Each structure stands twice: as structure tokens, then as C-alpha cells.
Image (cartoon, rainbow, N blue to C red):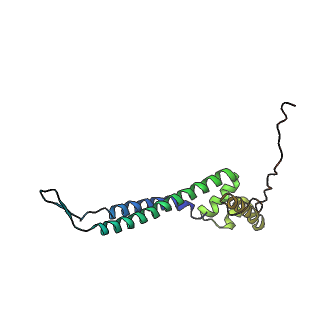
């Protein structure tokens, strides 16, 4: 939760790094020399080209994967906070994790003592942990849906 405010900047930096990697591996110093008969002579060789392409592709894929993961996590946080939490719970998350307020300040705003505050905070973390898949339905207190034999009795 602490890293959410910086995710946009992180995505921007990764995208800039990706652009830089793509520019870095663009051949700039490799010249082509043509003779009138049409033969092409290059500085470098096929093996060199293959190695550069392999390094470039590996780095490009790594950065693209990191960008996708960060965007996915940002969307997950936004969706979970927006759809699962009450307004008071959203405020608590914002104050604690995004504005870096201490628990004492939050307790003062909400007019709570320490124990009720931590009870609420733990409830919020359980909701978010469930949304992110870290806590099972059972651990979160959700009961499994019972299978029932439903048959259509429309024509009886």
C-alpha cells in the first residue's frame, strides 16, 4: 500500500528505460559499403548481430513485463480500494499509507483509541488481502457457496 502513490512514476521511469534500451541497441556505427556489382559489405558479422538482438530482446521483454505487472498492481489497488472499502476505510488507507500519517494522528481525527483503531485497520487489511489473493475466502470469514441440485420444475 505504501508504494501505490509512486506506481505512476515507476511506470513512467520503466517506459523511459525501455525507450533508452531500444535506442541503445539501434545500430548507429555499423556501416554498409556497396560495390557497383551489388555486393554488400558490413562491419560486424551475423553472430554479432544475433548476440545484440538476443540481449536487446531479453532486456526489452523484461522491461515490458515489469511495466505490465506494475500497471496491473496499480489497477488492483485502485479497484480494491474503490469497490471494497467504505469511505472511512478509504480515508484510513489514504492517511496511513499515502499521506504517511501516524496512527496517533488518525486516531485523533477519528476520535478513536488505539485498540478500536487497530481492529479497523486489521479488518481493512483483511479485505485488501482477500482482494489481492493473499487471504483465502475461509480465512476472510466467507462461507463457501453450497452446491444445490436445482432442477427446472416449470412444466410440472
Relative image position of residue 9 (x, y in whole percent): 48, 60
Nearer to me, 82 or 37: 37
Task: Locate the N terminus by quadrant.
Answer: bottom right
Left or right of 72, for residue 92: right
Q: Tell me if 109 is positioned left or right of 13 in this view.
A: right
Residue furthest to the top in view is 155
Q: Residue furthest right?
A: 156
Left or right, 128 with reference to 50: right
User: 103 or 40, which lies in front?
Assistant: 40
Question: Residue 134 at x, y = what percent?
Answer: 68, 63
Q: Residue 24, image x and y in percent?
A: 33, 64
Q: Position of residue 127 (x, y in %)?
A: 71, 58
Which residue sits at x=78%, y=60%?
A: 138
Residue 135, picture quadrant: bottom right
Task: Give the farthest residue toward the left.
Answer: 36
Q: Quadrant of the C terminus?
A: top right
The relative height of residue 84 versus residue 106 in the rendered view (above or below) is above
Q: Residue at x 83, y 47 (%)?
A: 148
Check the image and report above or below for 151 versus 95. Answer: above
Q: Quadrant of residue 14?
A: bottom left
* Number of callouts: 0
Amino acid at each position: 500500500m505504501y508504494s501505490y502513490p509512486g506506481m505512476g512514476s515507476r511506470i513512467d521511469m520503466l517506459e523511459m528505460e525501455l525507450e533508452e534500451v531500444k535506442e541503445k541497441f539501434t545500430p548507429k556505427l555499423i556501416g554498409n559499403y556497396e560495390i557497383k556489382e551489388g555486393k554488400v559489405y558490413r562491419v560486424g558479422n551475423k553472430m554479432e548481430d544475433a548476440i545484440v538482438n538476443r540481449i536487446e530482446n531479453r532486456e526489452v521483454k523484461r522491461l515490458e513485463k515489469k511495466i505490465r505487472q506494475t500497471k496491473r498492481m496499480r489497477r488492483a489497488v485502485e479497484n480494491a480500494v474503490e469497490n471494497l472499502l467504505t469511505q472511512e476505510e478509504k480515508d484510513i488507507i489514504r492517511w496511513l499509507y499515502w499521506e504517511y500519517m501516524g496512527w496517533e494522528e488518525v486516531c485523533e481525527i477519528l476520535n478513536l483509541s488505539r485498540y478500536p483503531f487497530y481492529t479497523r485497520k486489521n479488518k481493512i487489511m483483511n479485505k485488501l488481502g482477500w482482494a489481492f489473493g493473499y487471504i483465502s475466502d475461509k480465512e476472510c470469514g466467507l462461507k463457501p457457496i453450497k452446491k444445490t441440485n436445482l432442477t427446472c420444475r416449470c412444466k410440472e
